[in-house]
Amino acid sequence: MDRALFLAMSGAKQDMYGMQLHANNLANVSTTGFRADLEQARMMQAYGEGLPTRVFTMTERPGNDFSQGSVKSTGRELDVAIEGEGWLAVQDSTGKEAYTRAGHLKIDEAGMLQNSNGQLILGEGDTPIQIPLPINKIEIKKNGMIHVLPQGAPPEAMIQIDRIKLVKPDNKSLFKDVDGLFKFSAPNPIGLEPDATVTLLSGFLEGSNVNAVGEMTSMIDLQRHFEMQVKLMKTAEEMDKASASLMRIG
């Protein structure tokens, strides 16, 4: 009985992890630049005292779906979307370089260019981009170059400030951290060199690449599998009670 109970218990536990992952994807179906998490289960050997006679399943996140999300026009001068492959370089909370596809940018009171999560956008010199305030206009070119019109200056007096650092790493070398930013699986303190082949669409935003119907279907499948595991645990309990009853009769 203990083998059946162990298998059912471990299976139900991993089903719950899988549902949490797909629920997180669904919760971010409208998040700008979000990359869906993938989910899979694999067999694991249980080790401990005695012989390794127990096997259980383990749900894991093997990676992410890097396909491009839908691009929509906003007309906002600080909104940018990456065309094709590539990433925006930002500074995470520890001061290290990280990467995102979320191009909903803003300027804080100190003139620092950041994304909607408050992470600083890096320029070509691997330093945060600062906009000289006050300004009347800002333009972000296709190559990431930033031009601004100082307040009170004539329309033809646009000046170049910096260039957004755009990179194109091998997606297989990236993982999504708990802050939602993508980072290198192996330590890489230097960061990447800018890639001139990465281009931007100004006035556009890339949406999430989550397939809501597919995520909901996966959650329903996992829910049914979870219920089956619970029924198996109840069956194992009933069989154990019947066996104990027979022992008392004997």
Image (cartoon, rainbow, N blue to C red):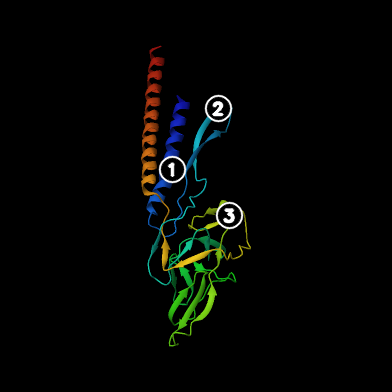
* Quadrant, the N terminus: top left
Q: Write down the residue under mark 1.
A: 18
| Residue 238 x/y as whole percent | 37, 24
The residue shown at (41%, 57%) is 70
| Category of crowding for the residue at label 2, using alpha-carbon neighbours closer than 10 angstroms: few (below 14), some (14–19), many (at least 20) | few
Q: In this view, does 234 lie to the left or right of 100?
A: left
> Disc 1 vs disc 2: Cβ atoms closer than 8 Å?
no
Q: Write down the residue under mark 3.
A: 170
How far apart are the two marked residues, 1 and 3, measured between alpha carbons? 27 Å
Q: Write down the residue under mark 2.
A: 53
Of the pair 182 and 249, the residue shown nearer to us: 182
Three-letter code for the amino acid on which mark 2 is drawn: Thr
> Disc 2 vs disc 3: Cβ atoms closer than 8 Å?
no
**1 or 3: tag closer to the N-terminus:** 1
The residue shown at (47%, 79%) is 148
Which quadrant of the view contains residue 243? Answer: top left
Q: Report whether residue 98 is seen.
A: yes
Of the pair 156 and 147, the residue shown nearer to us: 156
